[in-house]
Image (spheres, rainbow, N blue to C red):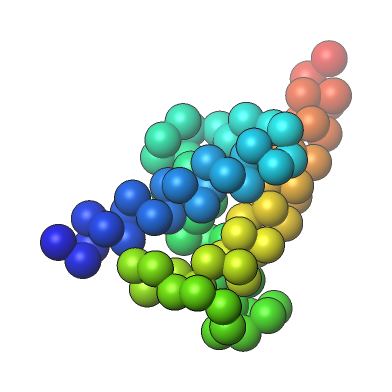
Amino acid sequence: MSFLWSLIIGGIIGWIAGLIMGRDIPGGVIGNIIAGFVGAWLGGLLLGSWGPEIGDFYIIPALIGSVVLVFIVSLIMGSMRKNRS
């Protein structure tokens, strides 16, 4: 049950990061979950473990890390679209 809870929280964090940035995350729900997990890892590296914790995620660092990740992915996807044209 803990794994399922982590998937749900990771997906929500990735979805919120996409909303904050105003950009879609490629891959839909799976992309949101991946963005949440990778963003939580990135946020933990950059900011450490602080703030409220839900489902093994420290919410504030995970959200900040996910926003950074969505920004980087959108830059990469934008440059790939430019190169195709």
Q: Quadrant of the N terminus?
A: bottom left
Q: Residue at x 42, y 55 (%)?
A: 10
Displayed quadrant of residue 53: bottom left
Q: Residue at x 53, y 61 (%)?
A: 38
Q: Residue at x 72, y 56 (%)?
A: 68
Residue found farthest to the front? 52
Disc tally is: 0
> Where is residue 75 shown, x and y percent of the image?
79, 41
Residue found farthest to the top? 85
User: In this image, 4 relative to 76: left or right?
Assistant: left
> Where is residue 78 shown, x and y percent of the image?
79, 31
Above/below status of 18 relative to 57: above
> Where is residue 17 shown, x and y percent of the image?
62, 47
Q: Quadrant of the C terminus?
A: top right
Does residue 76 appear in the picture of this structure? no
Does residue 68 appear in the picture of this structure? yes
User: In this image, 24 relative to 75: left or right?
Assistant: left
